[in-house]
Image (cartoon, rainbow, N blue to C red):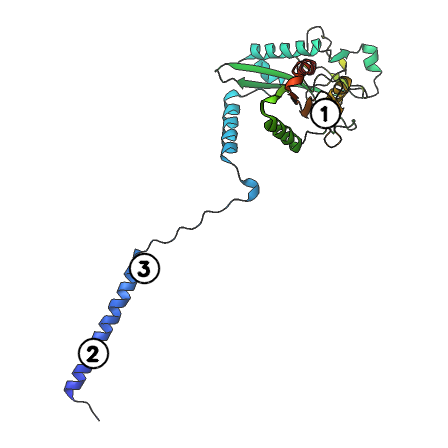
Amino acid sequence: MHEAPEEEADNAHSWRLCHADLTARRSAVARKKSSQVPPASPAPVPPIGSLVTRSQGKASAEALMASADTGDPFTYAEAMESPQPDHWKRAMEEESTSILLNNTFAALNSREAQQLQVKPIGPKWVYKTKHNPDGSTQYKGRLIIKEYELIDFGETLAPVGKLTTFRYVISLIGKYGTAWNMDHLYIVTSFLNPEIYDDDIYMTLPEGRPEGFNHPKIVVRLWKALHGFKQAPRLWHCDIDALLLTIGFTQCSADPNFSLRSDGILIHLYVNDIYVSFPDAATNAAIEVNAKLSDK
């Protein structure tokens, strides 16, 4: 049964309206999607081992800039061919004078050197340019021993002071306020003063050797430690422990770097930093202790 022409026209008109409405809705949805800002993708997270804090990054950058600016020589030949040979010579002379005054080694005669059953260890000069806060520049030369050439050497373990002990001392001072005091000593040459008793360490002298040692292949026997000596921390620990025992201190069994005395003086060692804590009543005794420790 056929529909009337009027109904067909109405149906066609309704279909066109529906189609137009659907098209308009689709266009509106498309415009809305295109106007939205896509979410930013999260930045990749570096692995935990490669995280660097701002202070570490600043220190690394400053170190790189300093190394790039200074161009410190790596060998004696480079130091003599650098634009500052006189500065490096003066630095080596100061280091050599300090070593000789400290009686760090003694030279062997030619017969003793020929009869050695061990191979002498090689030396090395280490050069460093130091920029001071006031704008001045210092040239440092350090004579080190290449102890990594040794296969067999004595014990190197040296205990380090515990932070829990240090916090205990700080809390003790905080509790009693002005009735307790703390002094801080930093022993610059702590690893260079202890004497070597157990091992016979022999070393050749480098180019730029101290005055008076002009033989080309001179061999010396070390009496005291040099920079780079692996046993130096342990020798320092044994040396300072022996001194504390002679002046009446007792070592704590829980922390071998913590010692106390009957007059109330407490000493805490952290490598070559020494913290002396004492009550007001022991001020004069603490001054005497500080003087003896400073001589080390």
Q: Nearer the viewer, residue 167 or 22?
A: 167
Say which amino acid is labelled 3.
Lys
- What secondary structure is found at the residue carrying circle 1? strand
Q: Badge 1, how many Cα within 10 Å: few under 14, some, many 20+?
A: many
Q: Which mark is residue 259?
A: 1
Residue lying furthest left in this view? 6
Which of the 4 quarters of the picture holds residue 33?
bottom left
Q: Residue at x 60, y 18 (%)?
A: 127
Q: Residue at x 58, y 22 (%)?
A: 178
Residue 187 in view in this figure: no
Q: State the image coordinates of residue 279 (x, y, percent, origin top left).
A: 65, 21
Q: Which residue is mark 2?
A: 14
Closest to the camera, between mark 1 and mark 3, is 1
Distance from Cα at disc 2 to Cα at disc 3: 29 Å
Distance from Cα at disc 2 to Cα at disc 1: 101 Å
Q: Badge 2, how many Cα within 10 Å: few under 14, some, many 20+?
A: few
Say which amino acid is labelled 2.
Ser
Q: State the image coordinates of residue 193 (x, y, percent, origin top left).
A: 71, 16
Say which amino acid is labelled 1.
Ser
Q: Which residue is mark 3?
A: 33
Quadrant where the N terminus sits is bottom left
